């Protein structure tokens, strides 16, 4: 029951989805809830994939890609997209760690953030639209939890650099056992997609490897520029690795 409460706490923190009233709330649960970040990704993936499957049955795939992405953004409240845009602004416009953090804390979006979010969403939508329908559904089911696992790895390995912030309640470092729980949550949908043959094994392996490389690169950049991570960095890692997986899936299916 405690683990179920932790999952619902993570769902409440990382999405707009309602949770049962009996769950309650304890601030201490937030420190342990990050282990279920990828499982929240499974829920968002099911919403996005179901939207894609239904709309692709009735409408052209580009429309399905847009509607499924919109459904995922609605479910999360654009939580991760906002972090990605803030990181683009901060890392693009700040010259010192203090200035980078100051810019990222500003709720207004600048040129770097606007350009970054347009390019990222454009790439995501184009890639999903070009995948065969079953492959797109499979990619959605894998990419959402996998990208959240990549973001969780920053909580596991890096230091949180703000005295306060939206990710501060989750900022206590994870233990290895907690990260294994997160990894298992991301592995299950990947195994299901491979068993159903919605994606080739080569696409999965290439996507996981490339997402890990992108995460390491972004983590090193975060450490070099600000000495650790913030909540915006988690959102940026999630968005980048999600798109990276779609690109690998598309590349693996090219003749």
Image (cartoon, rainbow, N blue to C red):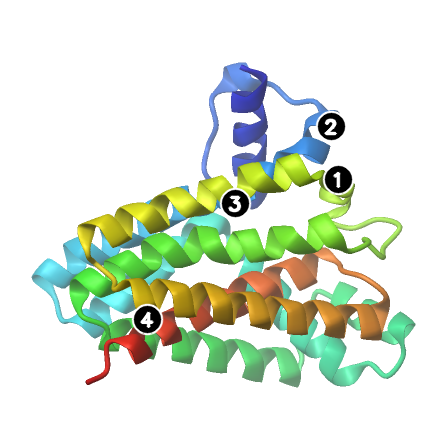
Q: Position of residue 170 (x, y in %)?
A: 72, 41
Residue topped by disc 4:
249
Name which of mark 4 and mark 1 comes first in the sequence: 1
Name which of mark 2 and mark 4 comes first in the sequence: 2
x 35%, y 46%: residue: 189
Please say if the residues under marks 2 and 1 sit with CB atoms less than 8 Å apart: yes
**Residue 208 versus residue 134: which sits nearer the camera?**
208
The local crowd at label 3, few if under 14, some if 14 to 19, many if 20 or more residues have their Cα within 10 Å, is many
- Left or right of 223: which side holds 92? left
Instruction: Look at the image and tell me whether residue 39 can be seen.
Output: no
Name which of mark 3 and mark 1 comes first in the sequence: 1
- Left or right of 140: which side holds 222? right
Q: Which of the two marks, 3 or 2, is nearer to us in this view?
A: 3
The image quadrant of residue 31 is top right
Residue topped by disc 3:
183
Please say if the residues under marks 4 and 1 sit with CB atoms less than 8 Å apart: no
Q: Position of residue 76 (x, y in %)?
A: 48, 50
- Left or right of 163: which side holds 153? left
Please say if the residues under marks 3 and 4 sit with CB atoms less than 8 Å apart: no
The local crowd at label 1, few if under 14, some if 14 to 19, many if 20 or more residues have their Cα within 10 Å, is some
Distance from Cα at disc 3 to Cα at disc 2? 24 Å
Instruction: Look at the image and tell me whether residue 212 can be seen.
Output: yes
Q: Position of residue 152 (x, y in %)?
A: 62, 50
x 53%, y 70%: residue: 240
x 86%, y 83%: residue: 95
- In the picture, the disc for residue 27 is 2
Residue topped by disc 1:
169
């Amino acid at each position: 029951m405690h683990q179920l409460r932790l999952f619902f706490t993570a769902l409440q923190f990382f999405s707009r989805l309602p949770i049962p009233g009996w769950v309650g709330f304890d601030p201490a649960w937030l420190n342990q809830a990050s282990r279920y970040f990828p499982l929240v990704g499974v829920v968002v993936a099911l919403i996005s994939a179901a939207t894609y499957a239904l709309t692709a049955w009735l409408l052209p795939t580009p429309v399905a890609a847009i509607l499924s992405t919109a459904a995922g953004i609605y479910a999360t409240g654009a939580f991760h997209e906002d972090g990605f845009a803030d990181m683009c602004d901060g890392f693009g416009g700040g010259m010192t760690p203090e200035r980078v953090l100051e810019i990222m804390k500003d709720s207004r979006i600048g040129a770097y953030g606007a350009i970054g979010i347009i390019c990222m969403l454009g790439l995501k939508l184009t890639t999903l639209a070009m995948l065969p329908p079953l492959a797109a559904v499979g990619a959605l089911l894998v990419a959402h939890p996998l990208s959240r696992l990549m973001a969780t790895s920053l909580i596991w390995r890096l230091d949180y650099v703000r005295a306060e912030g939206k990710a501060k309640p989750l900022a206590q470092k994870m233990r290895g056992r907690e990260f294994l729980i997160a990894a298992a949550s991301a592995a299950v949908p990947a195994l299901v997609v491979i068993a159903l043959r919605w994606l080739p094994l080569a696409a999965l392996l290439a996507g996981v490897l490339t997402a890990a490389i992108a995460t390491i690169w972004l983590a090193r950049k975060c450490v070099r520029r600000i000495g650790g991570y913030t909540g915006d960095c988690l959102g940026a890692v999630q968005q980048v690795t999600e798109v990276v997986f779609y690109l690998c899936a598309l590349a693996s299916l090219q003749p």
